[in-house]
Amino acid sequence: MATPAQRPPRPGSAAASALQQALVRLAQPGGNAGAEATDSLGAAVLREIRDTVLPREIILYIRQQPAAVLTVVHRRLAGIRLNGCTDPSTAAEDPEAAAQLFAARLRQLDAQARDQAFSFRRRPCAVPQGAGSCTAGTLAAALTAGGSSSRLDKFRAQAEVQAVAWLHCPRHSAQTQAGGSDALLTRLDAVRKALTSKSARPASARMPVPKPDCLLLPVTPQLHILAASDGGALLLLALPPEAARTLMAIWCSLYR
């Protein structure tokens, strides 16, 4: 049987070569696509977004295990669902707000994939309805902006998307930030007061800034509270047990 003739791009046509490579990769939506050896996870995801036009679910595998499902339509990221996470994968309709959420989840995946092999598998999907989305460029900007943050800020960006309630107390500021139900915020505030009173010292005592610390407090079989502190700032999170264990591992990867 004769094989179909393939017409290579004309010499010197870099754009045609890149297009051909993208078409070859995307022509088989169910196939595996390994990341290039020099790719970071973020760079590989951005390339997948730029190359995907038709609606696709892109399954991310880390160490050959499924870690997340990305929904991409018309070169726009419309959702990231972490493996085992029941939270909605979609975000607010504002592209910048969507990019911030997706960037936080991508940072979490990047920490999980550190020094580990990863790959993608694509499959067709329906166009998501009412989903917030962002371009690869907007997502890249959100990732870059997060690069100048403190380690606690980076941890917070990854943690808040998994928390059912959270309370952030910046250093040298009385303006706390919070999210979640009043009942859970009351619990978090009680933990904050207990930790604050425990670490209080006389005004005349010049104590050094406490070292970064992270405590996991089981409250019920269904709810754990994670207390992370760094440089005098405090972050409290109400979490399902599995998410709490995952975030403890992320904390250790950031502060090792």
Image (spheres, rainbow, N blue to C red):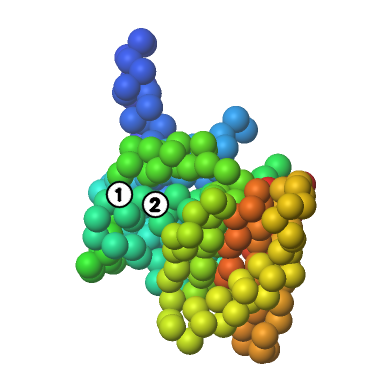
**Residue 250 visible here:** no
Given the current orientation, which residue lies at the most extreme top position? 12
Left or right of residue 87: residue 151: right
Q: Which residue is mark 2?
A: 100
Left or right of residue 106: residue 137: left
Q: Nearer the viewer, residue 229 or 164?
A: 229
Report x, y in % for residue 233: 60, 55
Report x, y in % for residue 138: 33, 42
Q: For residue 139, what is the image quadrant?
A: top left
Q: Nearer the viewer, residue 233 or 152?
A: 233
Are the two marked residues, 1 and 2, in contact with CB atoms closer than 8 angstroms? yes
Q: For residue 195, what is the image quadrant?
A: bottom right
Kind of residue indicated by mark 1: Glu
Q: Residue at x 36, y 30 (%)?
A: 20
Q: Residue at x 64, y 53 (%)?
A: 232
Report x, y in % for residue 220: 66, 89
Above or below, 98 relative to 244: above
Above or below, 101 relative to 2: below
Q: Which residue is mark 1?
A: 96
Q: Between marks 1 and 2, how big is the CA–CA gap?
A: 6 Å
Above or below, 125 relative to 190: above
Kind of residue indicated by mark 2: Gln
Looking at the rendered image, the quarter that the N terminus falls into is top left
